[in-house]
């Protein structure tokens, strides 16, 4: 299955960039983002032009005294005493109507651009933003103000500030995500998740949280995993380490499952693995729920590799060698023996 990426457009960050309020480091990170994302580049350019248009509209407002024009029109209507609704409209009335349309159009433009500028170019937006991925929407990518990128698995959400102004960079995760954190020794990056906190300065790692259990797999750098209510209870994780918080107990071990990040990489490797365990990997990768009509089916061995493969093709490949079939209803899948 081809990875789907979604870049969230941060209007306040664009505003900060255009107004020259970014620090040199923030500006460098943002310009790297623009260079790697044509969508951002187009919007930044368009936003710069919009600033010029807003100035033009402001000048138009100065030329036309809208309030006095409207008062004028109302007085003209009061002065003209129409005998009935069928009376022919005079040339003067037609001119008034045209003027009203012009004024209305100017109001629409002014209000429209005014609202846009209010939301885009002021700091009156909500300080936090939440991004949620749907059940089958793994691979949704978010770029933060500091240049850090987060990839969400399906049915996950991230809440984060539009800009990091304090001495820390704190976000909140529900579900699972892969983090690639921009280095900043002066601002630690902290993730609040379930009953744990994860603190880093610059590294890449995966976080999975479910039912008060938290798992952290470190790909690069160092990560500190601690209990949220007891921060003194913590473990330091380095490249390749796998940290787990379960039932208020912290432990560090190795993660030997080569399919652990398959939800992100879309690469699954099965070597004489039982169909039962294969189903667990597929469930996590594609956010589905596979069940079996017969427990004997679960023991069948599978040896194969899937790379960016659509779910239906995966299921077909699993069923064909063992004369199986499957039924799919939404996220629920039943694998059963083929009727003879």
Image: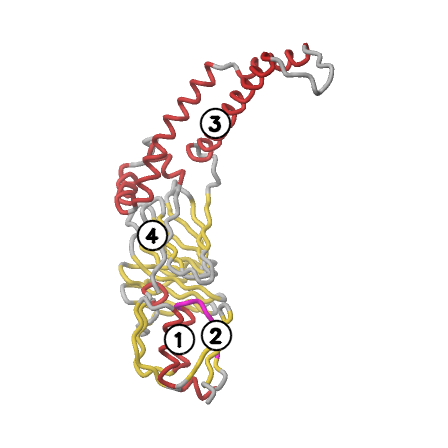
- Indicate whether residue 249 is drawn in magenta: no
> Is tag 1's residue or tag 2's residue first in the polypeptide sequence?
1
The residue labelled by disc 4 is 149
| Residue 287 is one of the magenta-drawn residues | yes
The stretch in magenta equals: 285-291
User: Residue 256 sits in which quadrant?
Assistant: bottom left
Disc 4 element: strand
Q: CA distance from mark 3 to mark 1?
A: 54 Å
Residue shown at the point (47%, 83%) measured from the top left:
336
Q: Position of residue 291 (x, y in %)?
A: 48, 78
Tell me the CA gap for discs 4 and 1: 32 Å
- Looking at the image, which residue is at 47% across and 87% down? 339
- From the viewer's perspective, is 71 left or right of 57? right
Sequence order check, earlier mark of 4 and 2: 4
- The residue to which callout 1 is attached is 315
Task: Judge depth for marks 4 and 2 and give the one in front.
Answer: 2
Gap between marks 1 and 2, in whole Å? Answer: 10 Å
Q: Is the Cβ of the residue at disc 3 closer than 8 Å to that at disc 4?
A: no
Viewer-closest of 202 and 287: 287
- Residue 333, label in figure: 2
Which residue position holds label 3?
109
């Amino acid at each position: 299955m081809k990875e789907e990426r979604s870049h969230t457009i941060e209007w306040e960050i664009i505003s900060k960039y255009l107004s020259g309020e970014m620090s040199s480091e923030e500006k460098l990170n943002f310009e790297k983002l623009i260079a790697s994302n044509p969508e951002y580049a187009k919007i930044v350019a368009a936003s710069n032009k919009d600033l010029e248009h807003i100035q033009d509209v402001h000048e138009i407002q100065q030329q036309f005294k809208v309030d006095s024009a409207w008062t004028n029109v109302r007085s003209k209507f009061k002065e003209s005493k129409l005998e009935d609704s069928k009376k022919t409209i005079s040339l003067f009335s037609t001119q008034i109507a045209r003027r009203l349309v012009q004024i209305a159009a100017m109001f629409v433009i002014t209000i429209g651009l005014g609202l846009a500028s209010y939301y885009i170019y002021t700091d009156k937006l909500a300080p936090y933003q939440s991004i949620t991925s749907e059940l089958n929407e793994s691979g949704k990518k978010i770029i933060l103000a500091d240049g850090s990128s987060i990839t969400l698995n399906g049915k996950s959400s991230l809440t984060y500030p539009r800009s990091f102004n304090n001495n820390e960079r704190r976000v909140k995760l529900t579900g699972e995500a892969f983090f690639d954190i921009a280095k900043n020794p002066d601002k630690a990056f902290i993730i609040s998740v379930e009953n744990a906190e994860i603190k880093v300065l610059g590294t890449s790692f995966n976080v999975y949280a479910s039912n008060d259990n938290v798992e952290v797999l470190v790909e690069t750098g160092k990560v500190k995993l601690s209990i949220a209510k007891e921060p003194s209870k913590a473990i330091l994780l380095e490249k390749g380490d796998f940290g787990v918080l379960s039932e208020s107990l912290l432990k560090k071990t190795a993660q030997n499952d080569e399919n652990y990040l398959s939800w992100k990489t879309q690469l699954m490797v099965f070597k004489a693995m039982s169909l039962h365990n294969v189903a667990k990997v597929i469930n996590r990768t594609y956010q589905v729920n596979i069940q079996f009509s017969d427990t004997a089916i679960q023991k069948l061995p599978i040896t194969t590799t899937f790379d960016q493969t659509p779910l239906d093709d995966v299921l077909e490949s699993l069923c064909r060698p063992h004369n199986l079939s499957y039924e799919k209803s939404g996220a629920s899948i039943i694998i059963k023996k083929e009727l003879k």
